[in-house]
Amino acid sequence: MISKPLFKAAIKQNYVVFLIILSVLMVYLPIIITMYDPSTQESLNEILEVMPQALIAAMGFREIGGSLIDFIGSYFYGFLILLLPMIYTIIVCNRSIASHVDKGSMAYLLSTPNTRGKIAGTQALFIIVSTTIMIGIVTLVGLVLSNTAFPGKLDVKAFLLINLGSLLLYYAVTGIGFFASCLFNDTKYSLMVGAGLPVAFLVIQMISDVGEKTRFLKNFTLFTLFDPDKIIAGEDFILQFLALTFISIVMYGLGFYTFNKRNLPI
């Protein structure tokens, strides 16, 4: 059971941020897709070679293969998909529980027939649904644009799997943010964990891509579990997807448990 008024309030509170992030994604994705030209791939790789290699690697770029899925996988899913939706999820997760407690509006919510479980469930559902819609729109637009501009050139299966992987990654990221929001009464502490950990994971991921000496850092970041290159190559990625699913379930479960059991300053 969820609270429909609370769900509608969450939509009203967050739709502007959702549209801003989605709009930015919708600017970059078409540009990247339409930039693809098999005849210029070799020249593009030569340009990448003369640029600072540490910076290129940190941004998720690499020597790109000749296929459309390689191009999109590197330029869009190598970095942009890791950064832009994360901004949205950080904001929404912080607003889900901690912001209501911090502002005192949680006392009002609990004075209604809504239980703690119903409140947390509604907020968690909004986070999951809105994140799914965002990645779903990206997937749909990517498919339509790719098949319009380059009919038959896109590896549809690999593209869908990459988007599924990014969605599972964000379920895990939002799980961390939701748990932090349920754990702390103050939004600054909620953001410290809910935003700090994902941002730290992204920075560690970027540093680990710089060279062999920093490669070991991949063991300390959640983003290692999302590897577009491995998905495109058809390598075994099932365990990574299962790990992201497990992390998501655990973090959301901990969020529910913590919010239901702890004392609130109301």
Image (spheres, rainbow, N blue to C red):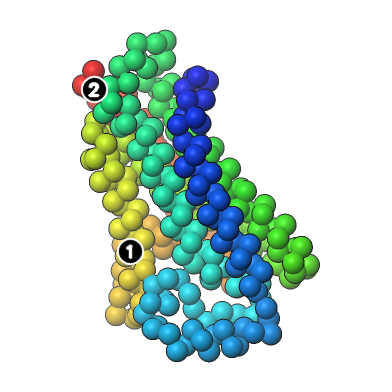
User: Can you give x and y, in whole percent of width and height, for residue 137 in the image?
Assistant: 62, 48
- Residue type at mark 1: give it: Val
Secondary element at tag 2? loop
- Residue type at mark 2: give it: Leu
Tell me if 18 is positioned left or right of 119 in this view. Answer: right
Task: Please state which of residues 103 and 189 is positioned toward the viewer in this rendering.
Answer: 103
User: Can you give x and y, in whole percent of width and height, for residue 221 in the image?
Assistant: 34, 60
- The tag earlier along the polypeptide, 1 or 2, is 1
Q: Residues within 10 Å of mark 2 (few under 14, many from 20)?
A: few
> Measured along the vertical axis of the image, is residue 49 above or below residue 120?
below
Task: Please state which of residues 180 and 7 is positioned toward the viewer in this rendering.
Answer: 7
Determine the CA span between mark 1 and mark 2.
34 Å
Q: Quadrant of residue 218?
A: bottom left
User: Can you give x and y, in whole percent of width and height, for residue 70 in the image?
Assistant: 60, 73
Q: At 30% from the left edge and 32% from the top edge, which residue is drawn? A: 98
Q: Residues within 10 Å of mark 1 (few under 14, many from 20)?
A: some
Task: Please state which of residues 139 and 217 is positioned toward the viewer in this rendering.
Answer: 139
Q: Quadrant of the C terminus?
A: top left
Secondary element at tag 1? helix
**CB atoms at circles 1 and 2 under 8 Å apart?**
no
Q: Quadrant of residue 194?
A: top left
Residue, disc 1 = 203
Q: At 53% from the left edge and 39% from the top edge, which residue is drawn? A: 130
Q: Quadrant of residue 56?
A: bottom left
Q: Count the marks: how many?
A: 2
> Measured along the vertical axis of the image, is residue 187 above or below residue 233?
above
Residue, disc 2 = 264
Decide if residue 163 is in sight here: no
Q: At 59% from the left edge and 55% from the top edge, which residue is drawn? A: 26
